[in-house]
Image: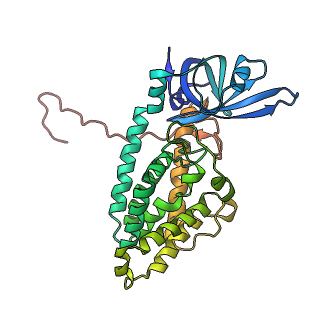
Amino acid sequence: MNFLTISSLKEQAGEQAIAAAVDCELQSRSHRQTKGGKPYLVLTFADATGSFNLNAWSDAPLFEAAQGMPDGTVVRLDAEWTQNQYGLNAAGVAWERLDGDALDAFYAGDAATAEKQRRDWESIRTYCASIKDPRLHALADHFLTDLGTKFRRAAAARRNHHARRGGLVEHVAQMMRSADAICGVYPYLHRDLMLAGVLFHDCGKLWENQYGEKGFAQGYSLHGEMLGHIPLGIELVNKLWRDVAEGPKAKGWLTLEPASETVRLHLLHLVASHHGEYQFGSPTLPRTPEAIALHYVDNLDAKLEMMKDAYTQANELAPGIYEKQFPLPANLVEPLLHFEAPPPLLAAEGEKDSLF
């Protein structure tokens, strides 16, 4: 049997069917109707590498079986898989619930993903340790110490990019690398503020895109639904700031310049404005160089992650041209290969090592 993760399945499935089994957790189900009035289910399954939707039609055995599966059920789906611009499709689905060693192995997750997220977590800790402003340094340390476990479980989104357990760590680590590089190109940017802004820009997603202590089904919360991650992030930064301001080290911050209240306000502005536009949920627009830079670093990492995934999942329309993937704006064209200089020609035996 050909066992694949969800990300591998998306990479390999296309117009031609492939036979494979995938272990996955039922995240949610949605009852729908066709135009003809027939019921069907949209089932969302997830593992450590990602998620996908699968339609269970009313005349298929999976429809009845899924009715009795509680959310969080872990199953092995064995099927003939194809993929188009709307996602994965499965024919001849057979399924079984996992238990025992197979279930433990599933919860352990994909080893490559876990190792990448471990390295990214260490990168975040290293960048935060390099923050020189004692107030922002203390704030970052307080956050990583108190909420690090919850942070490492969160996704960066519900779909589109880094939409997996631990995806927020991957997103933040890559943004920190970009922010650090950009500060080297534009030295007037405030590096400490940029790194802190990256760390906290999506901190509200610890509630909006959170996972349980075990499993890969992304949950929902009233706070996430009713407030969203930007207001939650602003509230969290203020709460953490009050915590560190009441600590013994804060007594030495009274004479620091810029003043602590100004530093706090600039950090809050980065959280509030990082979506860049009112229509995308930001309550204010970017008004500082760091806010502009953070917005584009965030958008760049999200878009490039979407493109990376799209190349592995899209059908090839013509040589080097791939089908448009939502929410990207157009069909994709295969990227230009990196230039590699040809190896030097070896002089023929007896020839002088000379150009003349």
Asked whether the viewer can see residue 186, the reply is: no
Query: Furthest residue to the right?
Result: 36
Q: Eyeballing the image, is 182 above or below 71? A: below
* Image quarter of the C terminus: top left
Q: Is residue 97 left or right of residue 37?
A: left
Which one is in front, 243 or 79?
243
Toward the viewer: 333 or 31?
31
* Spot occupied by residue 233 in the image (x, y as percentages of width and height): 56, 62
Q: Position of residue 284 (x, y in %)?
A: 63, 70
Q: Residue at x 44, y 22 (%)?
A: 101
Residue appearing at x 50%, y 70% in the figure: 267
Q: Is residue 141 left or right of residue 160?
A: left
Residue 152 against residue 323 in the figure, above or below: below
Q: Is residue 351 left or right of residue 268?
A: left
Pick the front one: 350 or 253: 253
Q: Position of residue 274 (x, y in %)?
A: 57, 63
Residue at 35% x, 40% y is: 340
Q: Is residue 140 visible?
A: yes
Q: Is residue 169 above or below residue 97?
A: below
Q: Residue furthest bottom?
A: 255
Report x, y in % for residue 318.
61, 30
